[in-house]
Image (cartoon, grey):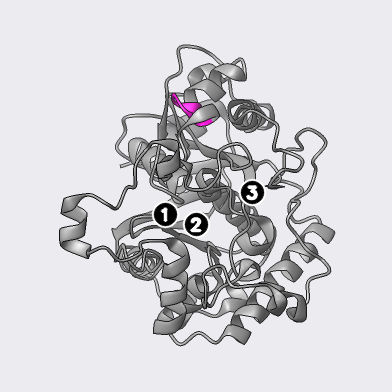
Amino acid sequence: MTDAYIVDAVRTPTGRRGKGLSDIHPADLLGTVFTALFDRTGVDPAHVDDVIAGCVAQMGAQAWNVGRNAWLSAGLPEHVPAVTIDRQCGSSQQAVHFAAQAIKAGDQDLVVAGGVEVMSQVPLNSSGDPGLGFGYPFGGPGWEKRYGDQEIHQFRGGDLIAERWGIDREEMFRFALDSHARAARAQDEGRFADQLVPVAGVTADEGVRRDSDIDKMRSLAPIRPDGIHNAALASQIADGAAALLVASERAVERFGLTPLARVHTTAVVGSDPVLILTGPIPATRKALEKASLSPEEIDLYECNEAFAAVVLAWAKELGIDTGRVNVNGGAMALGHPLGASGARLMTTLVHELVRTDARYGLQTMCEGGGLANATILERV
């Protein structure tokens, strides 16, 4: 088996809902990062074997295989195929997994993996909104026979996790405040400079709140009546796209490429769909076991900040030092453009591995339906 290498990784800034990126067609937004990959690496896109894109709400402007539409909208070669996948919030992380697996199997040599979500145009839960005529995904007889008619929602899941793991609300507020502070520091120190592709005059992530304080956070109403999490403790709705070029050893040699990292280990798990968001715990365990690594041997972690309790429960359960987690801020500050987030986190992780000369990085994220991916990267 050949290794799979990440040659480069790029992303747009994350735009706030209704702000700088909100009017850009999703295909054009994703096409922008596709083009940037080839501008930066010098690789002829005609040599790409496949394009795998993640997108969660595949309707409206994001329908009909947005990955293919993005590739063509960017003026890239028609003979290169593309597919769009949905593993919920982990869609573009799974895109990288599929790319690496095809390369390790010897079936392909160059694969573009990425994702997009313009939530300003296709709102959260659009495809499952009964008002739009698409039906409720958890209401069938088979589902109700197994899980009853209880509320199935990520907001409830986040609250249940906080209760089950005993995560103190003040601890969550401090964690959220730190997410914004870390993101602001990363911006000020230029840590994102090598990964960002400016779009439509937007040059920096729009969600970072430099004036955040705990009193302001406390003052926000809970998302659910009598709930635990409020908007300050949840990921921000956002717009964005990201993409990575994944290559085999043969392609690296043939095209004279200099990889940033190799895809060391991949894992994916199913978990309780009622709690929804606990999957990162078993996914991380599985990835570490497959890699024969301990949590202490991982230099940097990216765990998606869907809700503050998700990351804190994961770290508590696995004994992970949060000082090594989301060191440049997470989704509470940078936003969570669903189908793009897996590739966004991986882009940030691989560039931070290079910047700090670290060896191992692990990325994981919770996903709708009770799922989670975990990826271990090794800098080369």
Figure quadrant of the N terminus: top left
Does the magenta run of residues contain 223? no
Q: Which residue is mark 3?
A: 238
Amino acid on which the number 1 mark rests in the picture: His
Density class for disc 1 (Cα within 10 Å; few <14, some 14-19, many ≥20) is: many
Does the magenta run of residues contain 64? yes
Amino acid on which the number 3 mark rests in the picture: Ala
The stretch of residues the image draws in magenta is 62-66
Residue 368 percent coordinates (x, y): 39, 55
- Main secondary structure type of the part rendered in magenta: loop
Distance between the alpha carbons at the discs numbered 1 and 2: 6 Å
Res 24 → quadrant: top right
Q: Tell me the SS state at disc 2.
A: strand
| Residue shown at 64% from the left, 41% from the top | 120
Q: Is residue 200 visible?
A: yes
Density class for disc 3 (Cα within 10 Å; few <14, some 14-19, many ≥20) is: many
Amino acid on which the number 2 mark rests in the picture: Glu
Res 328 → quadrant: bottom right
Res 213 → quadrant: bottom right
- Cβ atoms at labels 1 and 2 below 8 Å apart: yes
Residue 229 percent coordinates (x, y): 56, 73
Q: Is residue 281 above or below residue 125?
A: below
Q: Which residue is mark 2?
A: 378
Q: Which residue is mark 1?
A: 264
Q: Earlier in the sequence, mark 3 or mark 2?
A: 3
Q: Tell me the SS state at disc 3.
A: strand
> Marks 3 and 2: which is nearer the front?
3
Q: Is residue 376 above or below residue 341?
A: below
Residue 38 percent coordinates (x, y): 63, 27
